[in-house]
Amino acid sequence: MKTRFVAAFLTFFPLIAQDREAPPPLGTPKPFAVPSGDTFTLKNGMKVTLAQYGAVPLVTVRADIAFGHANESSDQVWLSDLMAQLIAEGTTTRTAQQVANEAARMGGQLSVDIGADSSSATIEVLSEFTPDAVKLLADVLEHPLLPASELERVRGNLLRQLAASASQPGIRRHFVSGPSLRTPVPHRRSVEALCNRRCPQVLRG
């Protein structure tokens, strides 16, 4: 009986495999046209590119900065992350809460992100508030308060992030492959700090 059951299963299994190997037919690709952009340079030298896409009345304003982890020296690991969080702590004319409230009033939020080779400050709002969003983003970037009173709290947040990130498989994988030519030394320093739970100098009290 057992032999017959195994034989029947082996006979039926290829039929199941065949059904699973037949994916549904692909649909007709929808046409997509890359929106044309209008690029110009402001009087202050900043290059601007405008591109319109979609029908939703939303505008994303992003300022890209040619600075990231790769620009940090060995004693500046995570300095850019520390600065990014402090930048979000208000300006010389607005508190952090006022910045957040102003962005929320326009239907969005403002964020500052640090990357390996570049960084960005972004705000996404309803299109009717575009001029106000540009002014708010400019204020945050040009007149950051960088309050010393918030340094310890921001430092503590980064240290908790340091401890939590050390256990992530992706971080461990990059650490193992760190010596490869594809991972420049400045990038490895930040990863090494994560994996070894080593407190970077800029985060030490």
Image (spheres, helix red, strand yellow):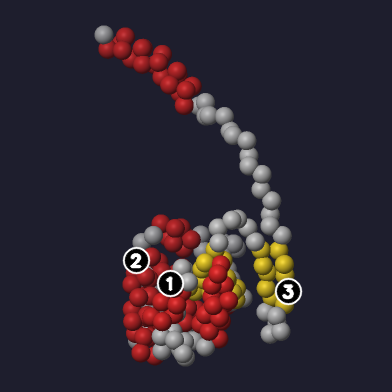
What amino acid does circle 3 point to?
Answer: Phe
Instruction: Name which residue lies at 35% across and 75% down.
Output: 157
Q: Is residue 57 visible?
A: yes
Q: CA distance from mark 2 to mark 3?
A: 43 Å
Q: Position of residue 125 (x, y in %)?
A: 51, 68
Disc 3 marks which residue? Answer: 40
Query: In this rendering, would 51 be left or right of 189?
Result: right
Measure how far apart labels 3 and 1 are at the Cα level: 29 Å
Q: Residues within 10 Å of mark 3 (few under 14, many from 20)?
A: few
Percent position (x, y) of residue 180?
Answer: 56, 61
179 or 115, nearer to the observer: 115
Amino acid carrying label 2: it is Ala
Q: Residue at x 54, y 72 (%)?
A: 129
Answer with the quarter of the image where residue 170 lies: bottom left
Comes first in the chain, label 2 or label 3: 3
Residue 93 in the image: above or below residue 16: below
Residue most extreme to the left: 1
Disc 2 target residue: 164
Report the residue at 58% width, 33% height from top: 26
Q: Secondary structure at mark 3?
A: strand
Task: Quote the CA–CA distance across marks 2 and 1.
Answer: 29 Å
